[in-house]
Image (tube, rainbow, N blue to C red):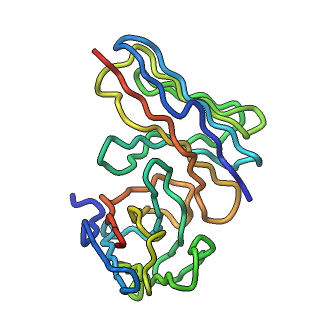
Amino acid sequence: GQQVMQIPQYQHVQEGEDFTTYCNSSTTLSNIQWYKQRPGGHPVFLIQLVKSGEVKKQKRLTFQFGEAKKNSSLHITATQTTDVGTYFCAGLDSGYALNFGKGTSLLVTP
Amino acid sequence: GAGVSQSPRYKVAKRGQDVALRCDPISGHVSLFWYQQALGQGPEFLTYFQNEAQLDKSGLPSDRFFAERPEGSVSTLKIQRTQQEDSAVYLCASSWELAPTYEQYFGPGTRLTVT
């Protein structure tokens, strides 16, 4: 079955540094979603990518979907302490099951 | 407006007991999902409802797990004869659309501890 791998598992940055997390799927995805989960909280939707090579921006966050629709990335420019949390990618190949990666936990120190 | 709510927020069960976890989705949302999230892991899909129809239950780990949504709104996830490996946070999510290709709104989860 489909597997979604995320790297790195953890990332510790100084406030103001950039951060990137990568997501790779073993199969071609119809779409990919990104979620953020704060410590003790629940996943909150950030964005969905559908088209091959798609790039979307939300303020300091840039999301990319690979040409082959098997990989994706999330890049945060100039991190802030409010960016702390775990970032999950979740891929959909077919059917109804959204397959989440294990997430990348981001720690930002001021 | 109100988001997705789940109850109870915490449940401690002795091994072998049955538990029932409730999910109240956002009013009008037709799609409802259940996930299991172990500590330090991403959510794992359990089952999907479109209104009252359970269209996918491929993620339910065993026949001890059963989910229903009889009137197309509130859903209940039932676990029979709980085992220690069932300890996890159970998340419910709902969506406006008929397919999972749209934003899912998650509830706060029920943390189940089996002793």
Q: Position of residue B87 (x, y in %)?
A: 41, 67
Horizontal side of residue B27 vs B43, given as left or right? left
Q: In the image shown, does A51 or B17 lie closer to the viewer? A: B17
Closest to the observer, A75 or B99: A75
Q: Residue at x 49, y 84 (%)?
A: B66
Name the residue rendered at 53%, 34% in the picture.
A9
The reply to whether residue A77 is visible in this rendering is: yes
Query: Which one is nearer the viewer's eye here, A12 or A75?
Result: A12
Q: Position of residue A72 (x, y in %)?
A: 64, 34
Q: Quadrant of residue A52?
A: top right
Judge from the rendering whether residue B73 lies leftward or rightward of residue A71; answer left or right. Answer: left
- Examine the rendered structure and indicate whether residue B88 appears above or below residue B75: above
Q: Is residue B108 left or right of residue B37?
A: left
The quarter holding residue B82 reads bottom left
Q: Where is residue B73 drawn, in percent x and y?
A: 36, 78
At x 40% / y 85%, what residue is drawn? B16
Residue A82, percent across and down? 29, 27
Residue B115 figure quarter: bottom left
Task: Tell me, yes or no, if residue B31 can be seen here.
Answer: no
Q: Is residue A16 above or below residue B95?
A: above
Instruction: Point out the residue furthest to the top here.
Output: A16
The answer to whether residue B78 is above or below residue A5 is: below
